[in-house]
Amino acid sequence: MTKKICIIGLGYVGLPLAHAFSSKYQVVGFDINKPRVDELNAGYDRTLELTSDEVNESIKNGMIYSTNMNDIKDCNIYIVTVPTPIDSTNRPDLTPLIKSSQTIGKVLKKDDIVIYESTVYPGVTEEVCVPELEKESGMIFNKDFFCGYSPERINPGDKEHTVTKILKITAGSTPAIADIVDDLYKSIIIAGTHKASSIKVAEAAKVIENTQRDVNIALINELALIFDTMNISTNDVIEAAATKWNFIKLKPGLVGGHCIGVDPYYLTFKSEELGYKPNLILGARQINNGMGKYIAEKTIKLMIKAGKIIKDSNILIMGLTFKENCPDIRNTKVVDIIKELKDYGANIDVYEPWIDEKDKDYYDYNFVQNPFENTKKYDSIVVAVGHDKFKTISQEQYDSLIENEKIIIDVKGIVPNPSWKL
């Protein structure tokens, strides 16, 4: 069978995957966001995961970027890479997955395979998505069509661990389909694959990857809070402890983004639905979600101690994205710092060089051009993201931006001589 692949969702996960597959297969990249598709057809990826040359390379390979359902009708493998967010109460929002499944169901044909990459709790593929496929197509699962699961492992902004260089978990709804799915990914993933025993196992493996990291970071964050009360350098403690061969060396900080700050809620939701309360995981989430507020309160306390008036003070926030060296602001916890400081009556400027100037109008923040090239002075600075560009800034440059006593809060440990660092 000649494989023609449709990638549903052209974000941080779908686009690099589509580009990788386009080197060996016919590929259609489908997205409901027309401006996004138009930009890709013009050779521009606003996520910066692909260069213009790479986007154009996929087009030269025959790849189609489209919003038109007619362009995906003759595909026989559909790979779903849509977001799996949470709602305001931290419950899974499966709407993108359900709507994608409904879209595929309208064009599904005999023997087609639908593979899901979106992070979910165990059971979503077969218990939520498959019924939508059956309903829309009128066909029977594992008789007329089949499913697979291969969780994404994209690390936004990472140019070393790209999609083909990260080992991939695969799974299928039958043993034969599991082999087909595994072989499909093996054909482009140079790092290799791991074939899981079932779709549910693959789903569970993905969700615990990020849950484990969330819990570990929460421990370090809690230790940082404890050591702060003791006036001990957390970084010094970590460096000393890391001399033991099996110590897991992590740094405290904000835990945002679409993965670590979201995925654990998928697991806790299903766990609680089945009657088990996952106290450790929920406790970790509470600790990590509280770090922005803690940093803001620390800033205010130091300003008060320095005799600065808080109301109508000017504070510069350096960095808005959820991690360094990428434009991704999904679920960034820097906004928690900003909100808390605004609640105290402070005026907030944001310096974020990784967000395109033309995109800044979409966000409700007072963005400023490079403050080190302007004359405006601030009462304090919060360095919230560890962009490489920020690491080149000298202590003298930081000091030159602040009136009176220097208050510099260093969340990422990159300022030479901060007033306080996490």
Image (spheres, rainbow, N blue to C red):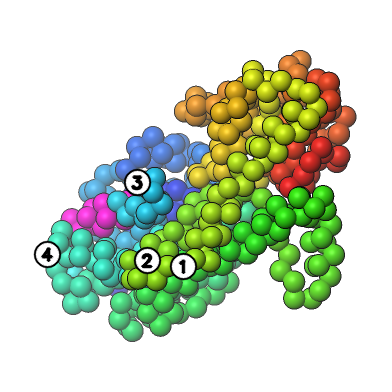
- Give above or below for 351 relative to 71: above
Residue 52 visible in image: no
Query: What x and y, as percent, mark residue 200?
Result: 37, 75
Calculate the distance from the C-alpha at mark 4 to the C-alpha at mark 2: 33 Å
Tag 1 secondary structure: loop
Calculate the distance from the C-alpha at mark 4 to the C-alpha at mark 1: 39 Å
* Mark linked to residue 272: 2
Tag 3 secondary structure: loop
- Give above or below for 389 relative to 54: above
Q: Amino acid at mark 2?
A: Glu
**Crowd around label 1: few <14 · some 14–19 · many ≥20 (10 Å):** few
Q: Residue at x 75, y 22 (%)?
A: 308
Q: Amino acid at mark 4?
A: Gly
* Nearest the eye: 217 or 165: 217
* Mark linked to residue 138: 4
Query: What x and y, as percent, mark residue 9?
Result: 38, 50
Label 1 sits on residue: 278
Magenta residues (range): 96-108
Label 3 sits on residue: 31
Tag 2 secondary structure: helix
User: Do labels 1 and 2 touch, CB within 8 Å?
Assistant: yes
Q: Answer with mark 4 or mark 3, whichever residue precedes in sequence.
A: 3
